Image (tube, rainbow, N blue to C red):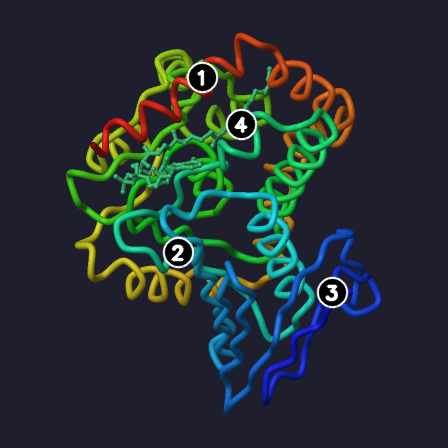
Amino acid sequence: MAAVLRRGASFICLGSSQLLSGGCKHGRTCILPFFSSNNRNSSSSSKIKVDLDSSTGIAVVKFQNPPVNSMSLDFLTEFVISLEKLELDKSCRGVILTSAQPKIFSAGLDILEMYGKSPEHYAEFWKSVQDIWLKMYGYRKMTIAAINGFSPAGGCLVALSCDYRIMADNPRYRIGLNETQLGIVAPFWFKDTMVNTVGHRTAELSLQFGLMYSPSDALKIGLVDQLVPEENVLGTATETMTKWLAIPDHAREISKSMLRKPTVDRLLASRDADTKNFVNFVSRDSIQKSLGLYLTMLKERKE
Ligand SMILES: CCCCCCCCC/C=C/C(=O)SCCNC(=O)CCNC(=O)[C@H](O)C(C)(C)COP(=O)(O)OP(=O)(O)OC[C@H]1O[C@@H](n2cnc3c(N)ncnc32)[C@H](O)[C@@H]1OP(=O)(O)O
């Protein structure tokens, strides 16, 4: 177990539940140095940057996994640990998720984690995808997605799991659950999250076609709540969070839980079966072939 301690760092998590108070359930290595000056606490693992302003109670969590913030196993592990830590921190009342990469919020799940690997790897990866959704969808604190770029599939799921979505009004960006375009299927809890946000009929069209929406179309169907000029995304998210934080935390939290718990419970009741289903599905030759073709298409598009 290797530890890296930088000068001034006072918090390190190495995948040990003792080190992350309140219980980090992940067996993998993660390093979260914690820096403090005045009311601002910053921690930066390699893929997630956290900046908590304890005077406002607002934390900004930035994805920094170049080139496209794809959600690899390491990324997901660091992400869930950062969220757990903020959830336990009494000085944090709300979390804004955004990207440190220009033009991309997140390219979704890292396809390479689902391609050419062992069944054991697929199972471990899928559990970490479940972990992040369970953490986000049931998160006790207020969450806002500040969507400053493309947000397909898993990127869209993360945004959908927040309480409020603000997107950059750039007509080139797209957001949606495009899984069918890769020849794969969004699992039932991705589908539930979409249905809960845009309604059943829109979700039917959206998931079957794997539609990717422009910001203005996403606003029309309620996939995002607000569009703002690109340079104002984070500022607007902070202002919006401040308004939401005027609501007493316990009342907002209980309301959120009442609305979301049945959806969370559905996955909790069938996590193992869902993992087995994923492993069987993604291990099939036909699915591997589809993913391989999709990766080739992404490469060739650049040439
Ligand atoms: C029954 C139920 C059972 C369960 C069934 C299973 C359910 C699984 C659910 C899946 C959920 C997902 O999120 S699946 C992931 C879906 N994601 C996507 O489709 C996004 C694909 N990516 C893109 O469209 C674009 O990359 C985009 C994000 C717009 C950025 O475009 P750019 O031109 O800026 O960048 P690119 O040149 O395309 O990409 C830069 C490099 O990153 C790579 N890259 C891009 N996206 C990547 C990704 N998601 N994973 C890995 N690598 C990725 C590219 O191949 C390039 O690699 P190099 O050429 O080597 O540099």
Given contact means CB atoms under 8 Å apart, are the residues at marks 3 and 1 in contact? no
Tag 4: amino acid: Phe
Q: What residue is at 33 percent from the left and 49 percent from the top? A: 147
In this rendering, position of residue 176 left or right of residue 302: right
Tag 3: amino acid: Leu
Which badge, 2 or 4, comes first in the chain's sequence? 2
Whether the residue carrying mark 4 lies under 8 Å from ligand 1 is answered with yes
Which-is-in-front pick, marks 4 and 1?
Answer: 4
In the structure shown, which secondary structural element does the residue marked by tag 4 occupy?
helix
Where residue 69 appears, as percent x and y from the top left, is 42, 48
Q: Which mark is residue 15?
A: none
Where residue 135 appears, as percent x and y from the top left, is 64, 47
Which-is-in-front pick, marks 2 and 3?
Answer: 3
In the structure shown, which secondary structural element does the residue marked by tag 3 occupy?
loop
* Residue assigned mark 3: 14
The correct choice, above or below, for 31 with respect to 261 in the image is below
Tag 1: amino acid: His
* Residue assigned mark 2: 98
Q: Which mark is residue 190?
A: 4
* Residue assigned mark 1: 200
Image quadrant occupied by the C terminus: top left
In the structure shown, which secondary structural element does the residue marked by tag 1 occupy?
helix
**Structural distance between the alpha carbons of marks 4 and 1:** 13 Å
